[in-house]
Amino acid sequence: MTLAVVMPVFEDVKATAQLVRNLGATLGPDVFIVAVDDGSVTQPLTPVAIAEAGLKGVIIKIKRNVGHQRAIAVGIGHVAATMPKATCVVMDCDGEDKPESVPELLAALNDDGVDVVVAKRASRIETLRFKIFYLIYRYLFLALTGREIAFGNFMALKPKATQRLAQMQEVWTHVAASVIASKLRVRPIPIHRGPRYVGQSRMNFASLVLHGFRAFTVFAEDVLVRVGLACVVVIALSVLGILASILLKFLGMATPGWFSLALGVLVLIVFQTGTLTLISLMLAGIARNSNLTAIDYRSLIDEILPLPWRRPTHPAATTENRGLAF
């Protein structure tokens, strides 16, 4: 079975070259590389840069920088269109997704009851601030969507899963959230995160927050309905507070000025929350009736460059001695 590895690349030629070499050494020469150059300017990815690994593949040049999620969507779309029977692995090019972990994903994918195997991080090389905010994000995502998200882009897909994701416009917004929304059978397995091969991550804190909250837009309907229900609860409690204030006023138990202040605040809460409820329900209706047509990935492609294949100079591993069942 053909194995296609999709990786987004942005100004990271050295790390990509090392990753491709390590993939060849780990998985053997039958791996097909789909490197998506996300509009790099100072370090554009060229076939020569990764040709020494001796692997077949293509470099997809995108016309402009669109972000790593859309770059992955382009790669998935390309695999689905040109290699419909291929098993697909999605991973970052910087080395944090270790090539040595790919066989673990593929081994779990052999189960007939699994469509997607995702890497659930067993350990992370991150700052304390990142870990705290990531934990808050996960609980917030669970509260607003009713679903748990504990994985990123590193995953292995069966051919039918690749075809399904390629038809989902949500994958252009957030890949991991789209896997959850796809209704595919997902199996998480613990994978240790590795260190970057070269340099530092270009994702700053603001970019990570934005990326995290984009996952909410995939489940916009569920989020808006839950927000609407929360607003209804707040309105009900505010109405009870208004009735209690009126009762205390008539019983003479309210201090001067307290009744007017309490009544004014509670009425204001009712009106504001009621407005937010209506807006939430209207947006939920818009989300339900939104266009579900898949985005044409080819519209973003500038050119596709094949890798000049040659026999690898290193002793590449074979699928037999790695225990893989492609």
Image (spheres, rainbow, N blue to C red):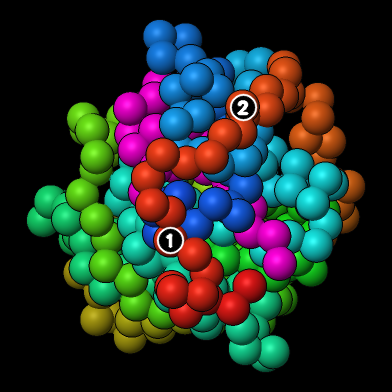
Under circle 2, the secondary element is: loop
Q: Is residue 64 left or right of residue 158?
A: left
Task: Give the residue at x 52% y 82%.
Answer: 108
Number of other residues with Cα within 10 Å of mark 1, as a class: few under 14, some 14 to 19, many 20 or more? some
Residue at 82 percent across and 45 percent down: it is: 82
Nearer to me, 219 or 183: 183
> Mark 2 is on which residue type?
Pro
Towards the viewer: 238 or 74? 74
Count how many numbered circles sit on residues in the image. Answer: 2
Horizontal side, residue 112 vs residue 294: left or right: left
Which residue is found at the position 55% from the left and 23% from the top?
Answer: 47
Q: Is residue 290 left or right of residue 105?
A: right
* Quadrant housing the C terminus: bottom right
Residue 33 appears left or right of 205:
right
Q: Is residue 21 magenta?
A: yes
For the residue marked with disc 1, what is the amino acid?
Ala
- From the image, which quarter does the N terminus lie in? bottom right
Q: Position of residue 319 (x, y in %)?
A: 52, 69
Q: Which numbered marker is on residue 317?
A: 1
Q: Is residue 89 magenta?
A: no
Mark 2 or mark 1, earlier in chain: 2
Q: Name the spot of residue 20 as percent of width and height, x first.
A: 44, 42
Magenta stretch in the rendered image: 1-22
Q: Which mark is residue 308?
A: 2
- What x and y, as percent, mark residue 109? 59, 79
